[in-house]
Image (cartoon, rainbow, N blue to C red):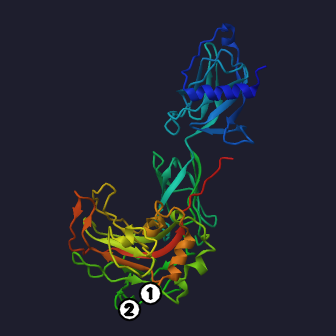
Amino acid sequence: MITKKYIWTLCLSILALGFTACSDDDNKGSQSTPMTISQVYLENINDNENKDRPVDFARLGQLIRIEGSGFLGLKKILINGYETYFNNALMTDNNVWVTLNSNTPVEKASADVRNTITLVKDQTRLVYDFTIRAASPSVTGCDNTMPQPGETVTVYGSNLQETTKITLPGGTVVTSGITTDEEGKWYSFTMPSGVTASGSITSEGANGTAVTPTFFNNFDCYIINFENDGHGELGSWNATYSADDLVDDPLGTGRGKVAVLVPGGLDAGSNGKYWATAGNGNDNDDWTSRMYKFIPAGTPAADVAIQFDVYCPESWDETGQLEISLQNNLSSYGYGSAAATSYSSQYFNTASVWVPWLNSDGSHTPYMTNGWKTVTIPMSNVANYNTTDAPDATFQKICEDRNVGSYRNFLIFGCNGDIEFSDAITYKAKAFTQPVYVDNFRVVSIASIAVSDF
């Protein structure tokens, strides 16, 4: 006796071998028999408890079972108008199995066939309304994550097409003024007023729901915001800039005082003074005591990041770097230095260098921003916490290293040395004079949040 379970297992095996479809049928009398569909099931082989689950939508790449009647003699299955393989040797009069081909159009499907399954015989056909979605939407980043009312927020990822509803932390809902990329790589909206809660942005679109990490509007784990309001405190000694060097937000967005990366500019081959936090003895510089309740100690370093806001109104290209150090212990500086690139079990190499104009292939692209933007630097970009040499590094390790270091100051400063990208590519430093404004340095979680379909 051939059971449904046997047919389903055999169907999976043949599909895996990539057989081509055969739609000939010897039972000519069945060509006029009406067809019905009573339910569509997801054949979820990764779920031991719900391998055969009734669904009202499915995603490209998934195997579904169509249950109904009159299927004998079936010649074609069209999904969103796209002819889709099925093996008629394995179907029954009441069940047919089909995998949704990755080439099936979704948002680009014609309106008259979108979200339909069409079963075709020589003398009859059945059109069944059923939602077809691309792969689950996902988020890779957000710009900007600490916006003022009226500023633009852009969320980046994949399969974000036709985003129509956005829910901000605290429950504020945005349904108008949303712009989406046709390829689903981003959506954007205008930040409304009155949002004070922090957390994730939840979006709903053609392919389902996506949730950002909990870094949006996040005031919980400030390092410094240059406002002298309890969100960090400036350190002051002969190697630092002081509160007198701060400037008003040049865009008047409400950010208050902000720092200029290198007031007065930098000569070739030189470093700027530090923008530094107060360090030892200051509660804001003891990350352990105040951040673990927001970012669990065991969080992998790659899921924690430094975020800050940057405004660069003029073209920045071919010279100049921003260096960040988690503590004041540097003996080397800038791009390629040991402090920023080399893992060490003996030294706290806890720096990272940001060069926005330098591309990953060694080419360069002028960097400029239209307003304030968010920069995210994962802790795994810090030398001693990189995923290759320290795959088990956690947020607790980062905090403990700071607490046992001699000087707990968090440092931000400009570097302007040569950049030797490779034997063939070197950027010789030149005078660095353009203003680069920075603000709101904070520690955030960048852990992805998966959204289940069920």
Image mark count: 2
Name the side, left or right, on which 88 lies relative to 152.
Answer: right
Residue labelled with disc 2: 237
Q: Nearer the viewer, mark 2 or mark 1?
A: 2
Q: Residue 233, image x and y in percent?
A: 48, 86
Name the side, left or right, on which 251 lies relative to 24.
Answer: left
Residue labelled with disc 1: 234
Residue 320 image label? none
- Residue 251 visible? The answer is no
Image quarter of residue 215: bottom right
Name the residue: 55% across, 75% down: 219
Name the residue: 72% across, 26% down: 6
Q: Amino acid at mark 2?
A: Trp
Which secondary structure lies at badge 2?
loop
Quarter of the figure with the N terminus: top right
Name the side, left or right, on which 85 lies relative to 8.
Answer: left
